[in-house]
Image (cartoon, rainbow, N blue to C red):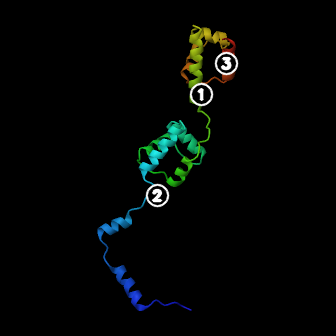
Amino acid sequence: MTHRMPALVADEILHQLRKPVSAEALAAIKQRQRPVEPGVLAERLRQWRRANRLNRRQAADALKAMGFATTARTIWVWESERMLPNRPLALLEKLAEKPPKTEPRREEVGRRFGEQMRQWRRKRGLNQREALAILGEGDDQRKMSRWESGKQVPANMRELLAKMEAAK
């Protein structure tokens, strides 16, 4: 059984299709509706970072662990409302969750260790060579300088921390 459209309805449809469309109507049709406004997403992202005490790099690492391929620069782009993520609604859902704990980067570990090393050495009034001698690490002042600046992380960092603790 085939269903036929009445001729009057078909004529009306054809008439509507042939009508000229105004520029405003065409622009309104072409304009894609955003699922979320960039300002709303930016504010929610900033609130999430502040609530969880994350800098942009840490936020990017947390979002990576949650399934979003991001970088600190991407976070900045989103927060400055320059661009929306590919899946903004999915991101907003993730922002309702608590971020997973991420491992600190090697540079951050090195910097923290260097600060501890410098504080320990200065508290005892030692220069870098004397501190190396106490820790049994030879006489390479350059090595101590690289550790304290965070440029290098010693392979035996845990042992050094234990020696520093014992030398208190």
Position of residue 14 relative to residue 82, above or below, is below
Q: Earlier in the sequence, mark 3 or mark 2?
A: 2
Can you say which quadrant of the picture contains the N terminus? bottom right
Q: Give the alpha-carbon distance from disc 3 to disc 2, as whole Å.
A: 53 Å
Q: Residues within 10 Å of mark 2 (few under 14, many from 20)?
A: few
Q: Earlier in the sequence, mark 3 or mark 1?
A: 1
Using residue 166 as the reference point, say whether residue 81 is left or right of it.
Answer: left
Q: Which residue is mark 2?
A: 35
Q: Give the alpha-carbon distance from disc 3 to disc 1, as whole Å.
A: 14 Å
Q: Residues within 10 Å of mark 3 (few under 14, many from 20)?
A: some
Q: Which residue is mark 3?
A: 160
Q: Amino acid at mark 3?
A: Leu
Q: Amino acid at mark 1?
A: Val
Using residue 62 as the reference point, say whether residue 20 is left or right of it.
Answer: left
Whether pointer 3 and pointer 1 mark residues with C-beta atoms closer than 8 Å, the reply is no
Dot 2 falls on a residue whose secondary structure is loop
Q: Which residue is mark 1?
A: 109
Q: Earlier in the sequence, mark 2 or mark 1?
A: 2
